[in-house]
Image (spheres, coloured by chain):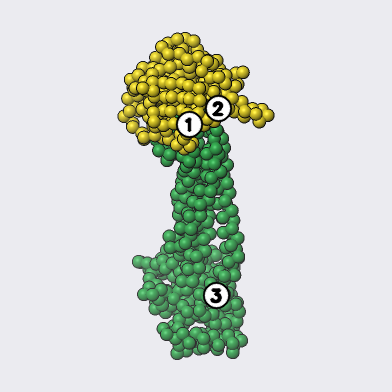
Chain colours: A green, B yellow
């Protein structure tokens, strides 16, 4: 009977306590991978979910707020800007495309975003990828009371072609703030993995002229999504200078993803806190293994003495105890990956629903080898004290 | 030809005030290949310590324990362990089976630290002791007599040259005791193993042709018994 089999039998003798210890390892491993891998994936996913735009032009205010509002549909606009500002930047030679965005209404909490039809028709949100309407639908017509729903929004609200609804004023759903206009859904967008999935798109004139909106701002927009011409890197600097340094009315957020990355940098302390907590959980799990095996070795002094009397060397019984610890750790690691897939999928779906950003939970990340290595090390250390107890077992005393 | 030759063997334990308490002092003892001997003496006279010294479980303070070509007393602990695993079988008074292991696994355990597991040999030994239909039974599910038979099979699992049996019938009733004794002796004979059986039971002792009064052999008198 090999030491490996003897270790496995030892664990089977204590199935419940071994399983609980393995589960605690699994939880800590899962937590570590989630905290670590999701941080990296969140940065990558948010930075790459710029919808194919290089910059956002918005009213004077925080660049982060402008980007979150116009690109990620997450925050409120710091104000409004004139239609002429949109036309001006669109006419700039360095600008390949510019699309106005107008927000301010919702349907049951899902944001309505007004834009030009060209945005949905012509823009590539990713290299070679344009918006497509699912079979049976079509894009809205400019100036009509028609809407196209993003895939996540449509799933959440149960929208389909032909569905009609009244928008509500504001970005938060307030049952008393219903607009009179009745919109009809003409199409559902195919999933894009970008924040465009979680909003309802309507013609920009629809938002501008919605009943109850101030007629004085009927031509204003919330922001402009800007795509620069390829190779026009200097143009970014020039526009930054023009709007941010010389001007005082508008803000030019360029590069668009930088604001998001800066946000993650500012929140890095929180990541450290989470990672420290996860590490502590892993250490506690290791201590649990030590306590479990130490008690087990105390209970099994007679068995160990018999092994020794049958010719087992001290290092053999030491090895068996360490193998038991590693057995629990390995079972825990398998569980950690299983839990990671389950929790990661759920969290990823949640993020996609809330932010419209698609996470790849299997994206290559250092967490997937450092976490198992770290936990394996903790498991190894956790087995040392019990193993030493087994090593020191007094054969004669325990054979009586 | 002597299989075992013990000379000037000394073993003491630490006494209450740090003084040495002599337990075993055997000047000379020999056992031939395949021979069977009964060590007779009351509890605490040092029989178990003597067997532990021969098995290499305990280190001697001085003296020689020659088994074949090897002086067990001169080996380091790990070497004694290896030697024991390869050459000595041990039957304990309270059997000391692994309660959660099956009969087969218990016998395989007796092979595990030596040359390796020979499952066919383990099966045949269990058949030989009358437990061929209990191979997969857990030790805890067996009667006391059956447990002792598994212990005997385990002691012979590593094809030992020498089997040491320490009060092997002490936990058995009269019928089971005589059956177990007969089984141990037969199996040792069949396997060419010598046997030293320690007991305080006269009935057991009288079954042996060679009987040694351990108190006469051990000039230390066992220490604990004094």
Q: Residue at x 54, y 65 (%)?
A: A109
Image height of A258 relative to A156, above or below? below
The circle drawn on residue A281 is none
Residue A249 visible, this orientation = yes
Residue tagged by mark 2? Answer: B11
Q: Are marks 3 and 1 in contact (CB under 8 Å)?
A: no
Quarter of the rendering containing residue A76? bottom right
Q: Callout 3: few (<14), some (14-19), or many (20+) C-alpha neighbours within 10 Å?
A: many
Pointer 3 chain: A
Q: Give the CA separation, mark 3 to mark 1.
A: 78 Å
B113 vs A389, left or right, is left
Q: Disc 1 is attached to a residue of which chain?
A: B
Residue at screen point 51% across, 88% down: A238
Q: Is residue A129 above or below residue A277?
A: below
The image quarter containing residue A291 is top right
Which percent across, then down, holds residue B120?
31, 29
């Amino acid at each position: 009977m090999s030491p490996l089999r003897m270790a496995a039998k030892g664990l089977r003798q204590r199935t419940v306590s071994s399983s609980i210890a393995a589960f605690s390892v699994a939880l800590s491993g899962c937590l570590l991978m989630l905290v670590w891998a999701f941080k990296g994936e969140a940065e990558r996913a948010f930075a790459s979910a710029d919808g194919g735009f290089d910059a956002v032009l918005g009213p004077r205010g925080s660049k982060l707020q402008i980007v979150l509002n116009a690109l990620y549909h997450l925050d409120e606009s710091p104000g409004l800007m004139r239609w002429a500002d949109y036309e001006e930047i669109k006419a700039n030679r360095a600008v390949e495309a510019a699309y106005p965005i107008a927000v301010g209404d919702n349907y049951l909490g899902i944001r309505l975003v007004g834009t030009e039809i060209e945005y949905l028709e012509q823009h590539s949100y990713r290299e070679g990828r344009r918006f497509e309407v699912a079979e049976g639908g079509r894009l809205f017509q400019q100036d009509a009371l028609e809407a196209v729903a993003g895939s996540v929004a449509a799933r959440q609200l149960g929208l389909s072609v032909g569905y009609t609804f009244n928008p509500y004023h504001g970005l938060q759903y307030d049952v008393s703030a219903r607009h009179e206009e009745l919109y009809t859904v003409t199409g559902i967008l195919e999933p894009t993995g970008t924040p465009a999935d979680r909003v309802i798109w309507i013609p920009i004139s629809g938002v501008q002229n919605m009943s109850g909106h101030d007629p004085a701002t009927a031509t204003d927009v919330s922001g402009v999504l800007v795509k620069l011409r390829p190779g026009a890197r200097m143009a970014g600097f020039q526009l930054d200078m023009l709007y941010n340094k010389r001007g005082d009315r508008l803000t030019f957020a360029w590069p668009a993803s930088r604001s998001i990355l800066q946000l993650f940098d500012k929140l890095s302390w929180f990541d450290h806190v989470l990672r420290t907590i996860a590490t502590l959980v892993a250490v506690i799990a290791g201590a649990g293994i030590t306590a479990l095996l130490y008690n087990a070795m105390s209970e099994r002094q007679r068995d160990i003495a018999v092994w020794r009397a049958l010719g087992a060397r001290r290092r053999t019984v030491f090895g068996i105890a360490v193998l038991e610890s590693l057995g629990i750790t390995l079972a825990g690691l398998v569980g950690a990956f299983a839990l990671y897939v389950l929790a990661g999928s759920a969290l990823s779906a949640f993020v996609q629903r809330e932010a419209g950003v698609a996470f790849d939970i299997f994206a290559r990340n250092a967490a997937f080898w450092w976490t198992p290595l770290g936990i394996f090390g903790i498991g190894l250390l956790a087995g040392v004290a019990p193993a030493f107890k087994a090593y020191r077992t007094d054969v004669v005393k325990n054979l009586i | 030809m002597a299989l075992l030759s013990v000379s000037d063997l000394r073993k003491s334990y630490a006494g209450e005030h740090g003084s040495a308490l002599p337990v075993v002092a055997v000047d000379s003892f020999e056992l031939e290949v395949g021979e069977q001997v009964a060590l007779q003496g009351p509890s605490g006279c040092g029989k178990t310590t003597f067997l532990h010294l021969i098995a290499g479980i305990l280190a001697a303070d001085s003296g020689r324990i020659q088994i074949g070509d090897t002086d067990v007393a001169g080996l380091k602990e790990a070497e004694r362990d290896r030697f024991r695993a390869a050459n000595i079988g041990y039957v304990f008074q309270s059997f000391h089976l692994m309660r959660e292991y099956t009969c087969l696994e218990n016998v395989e355990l007796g092979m595990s630290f030596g040359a390796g597991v020979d499952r066919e040999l383990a099966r045949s030994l269990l058949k030989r002791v009358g437990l061929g239909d209990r191979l997969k039974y857990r030790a805890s599910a067996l009667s006391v007599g059956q447990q002792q038979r598994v212990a005997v099979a385990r002691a012979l699992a590593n094809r030992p040259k020498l089997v040491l049996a320490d009060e092997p019938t002490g936990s058995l009733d009269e019928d089971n005791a005589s059956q177990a004794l007969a089984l141990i002796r037969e199996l040792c004979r069949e396997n060419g193993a010598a046997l030293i059986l320690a007991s305080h039971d006269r009935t057991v002792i009288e079954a042996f042709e060679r009987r040694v009064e351990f108190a006469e052999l051990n000039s230390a008198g066992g220490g604990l018994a004094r």
